[in-house]
Amino acid sequence: MKYLPFRRIGKALRQLMQGLVGLLLIGLMVTCTLLGTKPPEITRINGTEIIDGPGTAAYLSTLYHRNFPNCNRTESQPAFLCSGVTHRLTIKDPAEIYKVWDPSPISETNGGVSFSYMRADTNFSAFGGNYHNGYIIYPFLEAPAGKIQLMYMCSYPMDGWTQSRIQVCGPHADYPYHSHLCQYHNVTIAEQWVYVWTYPNPSAELNRQQCGFDVSDDRNTLAAPAFRESLRARALLAATHPNYAAQVFNEHNEIIIKTWAPGQPNNLPILAFFYIAGYSQGLAEARYNQRDFYRSTKPNIVIPIIRLTPAASLSQSASFAYVATDQVVTP
């Protein structure tokens, strides 16, 4: 049997130790990464469920920066199931007929509820009209047990003006040929969608004319590619047609989720109430919603209020912060 000289043993040992240290560091980084991607902790105090506020802000930042093409490398699992920030802008019903977290009477009639989807690769600064607050839902694959699954139906790269369409995810009466679900017009990739959007027609109202990508569960392995292309379409429009870049940044996209049964706040996958930084009225309404939700749930649930600071440009990032003094319901 041959033996390695001492120096060679020392060198081999150093290399082995360096390798072990490297593996240890990789393990630590992976562990930290995994810890950072976990949903916020939910604690129970005297029967009240409390979603951790700082953990929620950190988790939202993680979701925002997950530029995933799909979930679990499976084309039947669109990226919204595990990444991005799906949110709905809200305003308190003056007549107090329905709660902000429930579908409006219009949504109960037409079968769809309007949301938007924000991620680092699909930035926007404007959240629509004079709305400066709302709520954010969990991605389904990481929602707490017992929460209902909200079914995504279609995705419009820009504001779909769905309130004026014949039906949710359907055509607009003024543009019946271009404005149905994209696959009905042989539009399956971002390049085709951009071509239709930029087709020279000075009189066209582009938001009403646009088609929506069908991301419903029934599409199976076509669902993830459809959602991916709806996100790509925004970025491609801004990159290839600079005259539309400002509109892309200043306008939200639109996601339609199937209307769910109202009156079940404890079962809804609400992760946070939010307000846009700098808008005191938005904070006031978020506080009202936090308190109202707490009083409406049995057992009570404390949903954190998150301050959302939009990105300053298409290439920059939004941020999410938990501010203790913003909260009106505390454990």
Image (tube, rainbow, N blue to C red):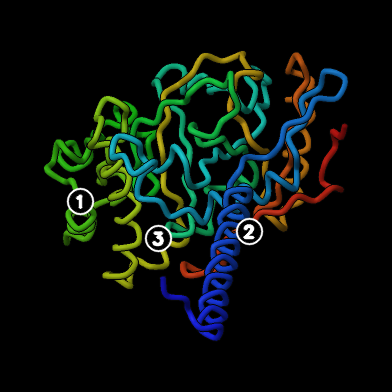
Which of marks 3 and 2 precedes in the sequence? Answer: 3
Q: Nearer the viewer, residue 63 or 122?
A: 63
**Residue carrying label 2:** 319
- The answer for how far apart the CA atoms under marks 2 and 3 are is 19 Å
User: Would you name the residue on which mark 1 appears?
Assistant: 189
19 above or below 305? below
Which tag is nearer the camera, tag 1 or tag 3? 1
Say which element carries label 1.
loop
- Residue depth check, mark 2 versus mark 3: number of the one nearer the observer: 2
Residue 19: mark in rendering: none
Name the residue at 63% across, 55% down: 32
Q: Is residue 175 above or below residue 270?
A: below
Quadrant where the C terminus is found in the figure: top right
The disc labelled 1 sits on which kind of residue?
Answer: Ile
| Whole-number angstrom distance, CA of label 1 to CA of label 3 | 18 Å
The mark found on residue 248 in the picture is 3
Q: Nearer the viewer, residue 196 or 123?
A: 123
Mark 3 element type: helix
* Mark 1 Cα-neighbour bin, 10 Å: few <14, some 14–19, many ≥20: some
Q: Is residue 178 left or right of residue 320?
A: left
